[in-house]
Image: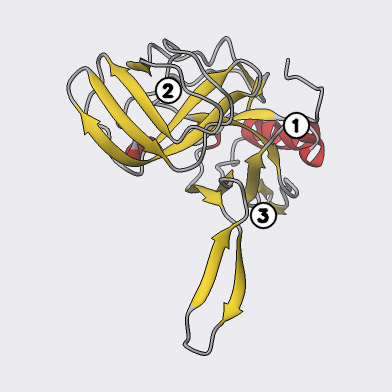
Amino acid sequence: MRVFPTYAFSFSDMEADIERQVLTGGTALSGSEDVIAIDGGGRVFAQFGDPYLDEPEMALAWKACGDALQGGALPVIVPLGDLRHQFNRDIRIPLSLPWWTEAEYATGASGAALSANAALRATTLLLALDFLPGPLRAGMWLSINHVALRHRAYRIKDVVSQTSTAAEIELSHPLREATLSGVAVELHDPRCVMRLDGEMRSPSNMGYATGSPIRFVEHFPAIGETYP
């Protein structure tokens, strides 16, 4: 699967978060209001703004990415780009444009893996830790490369316990796919399979391309379909 070159475009603005939906039954005379979640755990989104497109190569890569994404019809792997709030680890950026391949974007060992099987829609994970440069913290992103749904991003809601070799964490939303013990957990450079939500335009200003803000949302294959 293709990888969107998040870091190559040097975005000045980025946000990754979880879209949630709630339903309210209205406000009672007492002023209280019942609110329940109806989103099944929410949907991950990422939006980026102010890309660097001054160089012709970058401007052409931006246009080519927009063409290939087909208005959201093509799912891609999107690095979430929140490195400063992870472990601030240097990430090796491929030189090829307009796309990166999974093979050239392969990162080093993640330093963490599941230490027990995790069921579909689990919200608690047990981790075996190897060489993380710092402690896990609530608010950090992680991702797991699942067998069927591929890369899925989750956020740590709470660190229940942690030692130098093990941790128990609670997730922001349920696990998308049952996963076996020993599967790596990506904590340095989380990513997610997503689709473009909206357009990817690049008007010119004084002869220079200016990229518009873009937004991605988590992509799920249709029933019976699989990812390459």
For residue 171, which quarter of the picture?
Answer: top left
Pointers 3 and 2 in contact (CB under 8 A)? no
Q: Amino acid at mark 1?
A: Ala
Q: Residue furthest left?
A: 164
- Residue pointed to by mark 2: 186
The residue sitting at 57% across, 24% down in the picture is 151
- What distance separates the C-alpha of mark 2 from that of mark 1? 29 Å
- What distance separates the C-alpha of mark 3 from that of mark 2? 42 Å
The residue sitting at 73% across, 52% down in the picture is 203
For residue 148, which quarter of the picture?
Answer: top right
- What distance separates the C-alpha of mark 3 from that of mark 1? 21 Å
- In which quadrant is the N terminus drawn? top right
- Residue pointed to by mark 1: 64
Q: From the viewer's perspective, is 186 left or right of 88?
A: right
167 or 54, which is in the foreground?
167
73 or 94, which is in the foreground?
73
13 or 179, which is in the foreground?
179
Query: Residue 77: where, in percent of width, then height?
Result: 62, 27
Q: Is residue 8 visible?
A: no
- In which quadrant is the C terminus drawn? top right
- Residue pointed to by mark 3: 206
Q: Earlier in the sequence, mark 3 or mark 2?
A: 2
